[in-house]
Image (cartoon, rainbow, N blue to C red):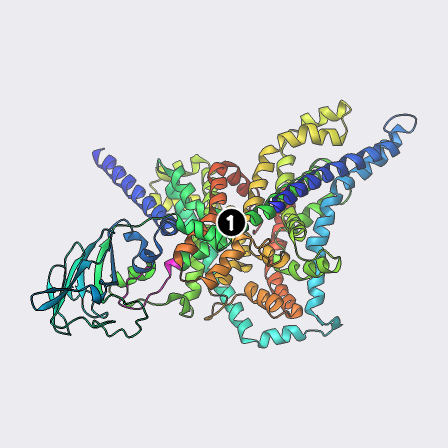
Amino acid sequence: MDNIAGKRGRLTWVLNIAVFLLVLLWTIPTIGLLVSSFRDAQQIQTSGWWTSLTPQKESWAARTATPGSAAQDGGAYVLEGNVFGDDAGEVVAFGVTPMQPEAFAAGETADHPDGGTLTVAADGSYRLTSPEPFATPDVVVGDTAGGAEPRGLRIFVTSTEPPDFTTGNYGTVLTADGMGQSFLNTLTVSIPATVIPILVAAYAAYALAWMSFPGRALLVSAVVGLLVVPLQLSLIPLLQLHNNIGLGRGYIGAWLAHTGFGLPLAIYLLRNYMVGLPREVIESARVDGATDFEIFRKIILPLSLPALAAFGIFQFLWTWNDLLVAKVFLGTSDTQMVMTGRIVELLGSRGTNWELLTAAAFISMIVPLIVFFLLQKYFVRGLLAGSVKGG
Amino acid sequence: MNQILLAAITIVIGVVGCLAYFWLSNMLLDRMFPPRGSNAAHNLRVSGRIRPWLFLAPAIFFLGVYLVYPVFGSLWLAVSRGGDFIGMDNFIWMVNDPKFRESLLNNLLWLIFVPTMATLIGLIAAQLTDSIKWGAIAKSLIFMPMAISFVGAAVIWKFIYEFRAEGLAQIGLLNAFVTSLGFEPRAWLTLPVWNTFFLMIIMVWMQAGFAMVLLSAALRGIPDETIEAAILDGASPWQVFWRVQVPQIWGTIAVVWTTITIMVLKIFDIVFAITNGQWGTQVLANMMYDWSFRAGDFNRGAAIAIVIMIAVLPIMIWNIRNASRERD
């Protein structure tokens, strides 16, 4: 018996670990995005986000005080100061050429190519000596670009800095990169595009579920068939139609398109749900002289709320996340560009600014994620009922 | 703020308009054929015949204009140019176009890889999460990518595939992993064939949760007796799963498979956002977008859309047959 219990215990362990690894694999990409969106732009470029909690090593060029301020100490000219200025930091290494910023450990004394010596301590304080007066503008690498203002000499240091987290990336993308406006645009598209199809579909679903008329079976089949009609097929004829009737590109066109594309799933889901409602309730209401209109409003609609919610969530996520319909039926002006479209543009224009891209992506994900986690029950129910649809 | 107002007004107009339509049209019907008086029976019959269509009219209008009409519109566009019938020219061009053949091949790869991997991972995840205590949390975390847009997922994964020259610190997770094993970092997204797989992984990541949720519901619906009987007969957990449980949920597996297949046939956003079809990653839907809205050639665009439609057709017929069988 012990043996079996031990085996089961081990199996449970293996199961737990396997699921844990799977969950880790599935969440790490999103965690990476979230962490990166809060990191300092410089640190994102020089280290992986998974190291973001440890001190960041960074190589850079500091400038000394201006050569004119050099003090004379015995026979040598001396420049002293701190590479961090007023900030804090820790120098781990330094060098005398830009190619070798880690040639000497902090605290060592390096021979300078121009005679003289350089010492950089761990706290950032440096001491640069030279037997000759320091040339202006630059002795270290012969920087000849000196302007009117005398500049300091360059010291190449590798320092560790504390992890730097900021919400500034969000500020930048929301304002300068237009994600704030796009957030409003997305909201503008998706709310009417969610509400209107629900009503239209609810009436149709009731008719298909509880009214008898010739051609009903055919219509239900048609709805099932239309569930999978690819969006691509509709784009061009509809855009032409919108242009021909003077609608052009804009919110109204996008709402209508989303309504049309969402209807098959809405009708399918709601009809399946309504068919399952108890027949006795509806029959007895009929006997009591209620009209179809009253039955629908007073009995069917309240009872169908879970299905309405399921479709509502589905359609909301779909319209919120949509790129194609927005690209085709909306204009490209600032007041019409939705978040997905904006992010695609940012991917093109700011392809290496990961602090901005990740922040923008997270802004676009936050609402769907909230909806998803709060209303998961309904969402799952909708999925289970409507899995014929292909998105 | 103006446009939020516009949206709010639209909702009000839309909702009130819908309600007004249904209410007024029903009232009108009752006025024309009052269900009382001398002709009550006849009137009831007539209004009973008309009323379903009042309920259906807006839906039929939308379905007709936004889904049925475009099918024929696209068909006509595909066989015409500038309004003149040109037969199969667009399709002949297509077959001879190397980019089209590349797209077709890539779509085929997508069709084989994504539904298979997503279903398989979903199946395993369903079985594993159903047998542990914190399964519900695990499920919702694996399911989460489903709520994210394709574009958001594209950013997430493009960052993972990010490439830095050898010697620099890799900031992309994949290259960091590869270099830690001692290999050279690669610009994965520009490596033909591999890059298509890296794009497909994104889709698998997003769809596995969907498969898991459906399959887990199906697995729970299996009668316990069949599993108990198998265990009593000495079957191992492995055998119970593959020989007893899986065969009983073939129906759901097929539904999951076809749903993901349809999604994959239309795959657009991921390719559009990450490679835009460069480096041998082109797919039909992106090519369709390119020709229609970048090159402005609606006819060739429509022809490509028709190909996607033809690919969906078998699934559509299968669905309709299944649905009508269920009704009977």
Q: Is residue B24 toward the left or the right of residue B195 in the image?
A: right
Residue depicted at x 61% and y 41%: A269
The residue most toward the left is A74
Q: Is residue B117 visible?
A: no
Pick the front one: A80 or B247: A80
Q: Is residue B308 left or right of residue B149?
A: right
Q: The residue under label 1 is which amino acid type?
A: Gly
Res. B130 image quadrant: top left
| Disc 1 target residue | A180
Q: Position of residue B224 (x, y in %)?
A: 43, 35
Q: In which quarter of the image is the N terminus of chain A?
A: top left
Report the magenta stretch's main SS.
loop
- Dot 1 falls on a residue whose secondary structure is helix
- The residue sitting at 31% across, 42% down in the picture is A15
Viewer-proximal residue among A269 and A253: A253
- In this rendered view, identify the residue nearer to me: A49 or A319: A49
Q: Where is residue A263 in the image (x, y as percent from the top left)?
A: 65, 46
B162 falls in the magenta region: yes
Q: Position of residue A325 (x, y in %)?
A: 60, 55
Locate residue A282 relative to residue A382 in the image: left or right: right
Which range of residues does the magenta coloring cover? B159-171
Q: Toward the viewer: A240 or A175?
A: A175
Q: Is residue A240 magenta?
A: no
